[in-house]
Image (spheres, coloured by chain):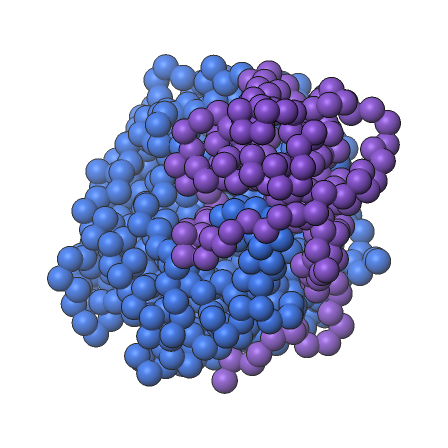
Chain colours: A purple, B blue
Amino acid sequence: MTDESLSRREMLEVTAAALAAPLLRAGPAAAAPVTPAALALQGAPKFFTGPEFALLEELSDLIIPTDAHSPGARAAGVAAYIDFRLSDSPDPEQQSTWRSGLAAVEALSKELNGQAFLQGSAEQRVAVLTRMAAGEHDPKTPADHFFQTVKHWTARAYYTSKVGIHADQQYKGNVYQRGEYAGFDAK
Amino acid sequence: MTLVRVAPPLAQDVDLSKTYDAVIVGSGAAGGMAAHVLTTRGLKVLMLEAGKKLPIEQELRSMQWPYDHPRRGDAPPGYHSLSFNEYTIRTPPYAKNSTFKHVMSYVGGWGGSDYVKNILVDEKDHPYSGTKYAWVRARALGGKTNIWGRLALRLSDYDFKGKTHDGYGDDWPIAYADLEPYYDKVDLYLGISGVKENLPHLPDSLFQRPNKLTFGEVKLRESLKKMGRVVTPYRAGVTTDGVKHNRYRSKCYGRGACDRRPGGCDIHAAFDSPTGLIYPAMDTGNLTIRTNSIAHEVLVDSNTGKARGIAFIDSATHQSYEAKAKVVIVAASTLESARLLLLSRSSQHPNGIGNSSGHVGHNFCEHVMGPGVTGLVKDLVGKPPTLDDGLPGGFYIPRFRNLKDRQPGFVRGYGFEGSGGFSIFPGNATGTPGFGAQFKKEVRDHAGAFIGMGAFGEVLARYENYVDLDPDSKDAWGVPVLRFHYQFGDNERKMCEDMVVAGREMFEAAGIEVVGTDEKILTEGWSIHELGTARMGSDPKTSVLNQFQQSHDVKNLFVVDGSSHVSASCQNPTWTIMALAWRSCEYLASEFKKGNV
């Protein structure tokens, strides 16, 4: 599922952007509003338990929340996509990474807030995620490592969704251009 | 939307009782061109392709949105694409003991493995051994042209006469003037997009409507002009105006599909061998094609020592067959062609056919890649999205090293390929730190502001870089496999160091903030530009083929693919492969009619 291979093109795009990351300002995480279950899941989750799924959905929506510009990860069905991919995965190791990762989030929540993640206030949830994200570039704890996984997959799922491509990125391509190509002439 | 005519059907049963004028092994750029040239001159030709004929439009699905695919483009469970780590840590055969059912080369991990899973070979069935090598193979009608990168460049006398210029290696037995008319023919027959730059080291083609540049690319072009360097729109082997004589191909509509995936164009505006060359050749009535046909020996007439045909195995049934022909044309790709020659041992040709020089498999060269630079165009941060990837490529910076100057650390040179601006997936999404509304806004504001480029450098042809047959290992059809003895050397390493320095310098000069450099050299083979295992030359003792890609030893044997190249140059080879094949096959047809082969 996760593919870390470089390619000629991704070398220029994906990796390039990753290299760019340290220079982009890492601002304080904004407290994301906790929205009620915006979209009811179609049927039960295929891989996760109900509580695991609810936790994943909330985490994804904290990573990419709805803002004034566009809907967030919950509306984009990010958790359902990850659930489908894991149910479809032949790799038990990967499956256990997700299960134990979500458990690590719960453990961290208990440690910081004394209660389950979803029982915490909006501020308390953000505090847990902020702690996990602090180790993003040098992950040490299981929760740090899981932050990387859940963020990577949230981003992949969100920016390949209808919401991500059209509402958020307002991507202009993948269309038939009848006349000239868009862009500037090489003079 | 139907833009192109349906391909002619392949015959169910191919007549193997008759003797064809020519049999061609391989259906990629070289084999397709040989078929085009020979069939239009009236020769009766049989083409053998090891792979299947795929319903290619259904494989490529160029316009499919990620969210309309259940796995957003990924292959089904059980498929795996090799990663840089695997190529680095392990040695071939890479798929050995893999727990995955199917293993593909790294290209499968290139943003859409489901679209190439049937085009690339399964490494499990096609092992190889020896030194590390990322060997990308496509067994299908059309070979790698189904998914090639489309950069279509000419070579110049800086390449053909490289030894004269700098003393290294060997000159080719031809000069640019010999090949120029054939480059022109390829341009006109297949269509190419580009802008004239009048560079002696990168001759212009006969261009159709050019690509455009994005904002950041224009900035770079303007700046490099002051340094005496050039940023030119990607010279794409794509027909941007259409080719009226070809009813299987549409003109390009700037859908950008070719840059979203491992390549491929389901309206065939990008050149591919089936629609560009093979289907029109079939329309002459002179071309017969047999797919699923794995050639494993060039058969020899025991009286004359000449080639008399090809022995092959049906990939599906494992049955053995022979095809008979007056001329054998090998066009199986640089490495597969060398393998086939080496496999063809007989009492007349004990070291493999055409190998009295001992040079088959040697002088193996290619392009080295990996180093690159990424920049941020600050003027673009926060700007509304624009359509930046709706064209068949980004930009190209031609070679600028060792033309008039002499670099202290290395000979020869490199060019950069790159692109800037918005694309369908914001590549910065996985690299931007943090989370929440701030993260989301940062991704959005910066998504179109990046520009990146990576270099392709000439790997020097050296006798000691070679492939031979592994005496102990066979593929799924019982054919001995290749063993690699191939490594980059000091010239490549020094050149790669310079790529990073020069890339940074050019971005900085253009006021583009360098936000990252990549210094890592990718595994040997990564460029998919392997060349030179059966090189041309004037001396039969040190070369395999003459200037018409004709075997010095066996005059009815031709090897018309990249294996014939004497040096790698730093320009992408496909257009040169086709121009050479055109020239050689024109010569062959003329000699054939005179009864000289």
User: Residue reaching furthest left?
Assistant: B408
Q: Measuring 80% from the left and 56% from the top, which residue is drawn there? A: B5
Q: Position of residue B12 (x, y in %)?
A: 77, 33
Looking at the image, which is closer to me, B229 or A108?
A: A108
Residue B512, compared with residue B299, is above or below; it is: below
Looking at the image, which is closer to me, B72 or B6?
A: B72
- Asked whether, in this view, residue B383 is left or right of residue B524, the answer is right
- Asked whether, in this view, residue B238 is left or right of residue B330, the answer is right
Residue B86 in view, yes or no: yes
Please count the marks in the image: 0
Residue B290, compared with residue B509, is above or below; it is: above
Q: Measuring 55% from the left and 43% from the top, which residue is drawn there? A: B110
User: Residue reaching furthest front?
Assistant: A114
Q: Position of residue B576 (x, y in %)?
A: 44, 59
Q: Quadrant of residue A36?
A: top right
Q: Measuring 47% from the left and 53% from the top, which residue is drawn there? A: A26
Residue A110, compared with residue B510, is above or below; it is: above
- Asked whether, in this view, residue B54 is left or right of residue B33, the answer is right
Residue B181 in view, yes or no: no
Q: Position of residue B253 (x, y in %)?
A: 71, 66
Q: Position of residue B228 (x, y in %)?
A: 31, 80
Locate the N terminus of chain B by quadrant.
Answer: bottom right
Q: Measuring 56% from the left and 58% from the top, which residue is drawn there? A: B442
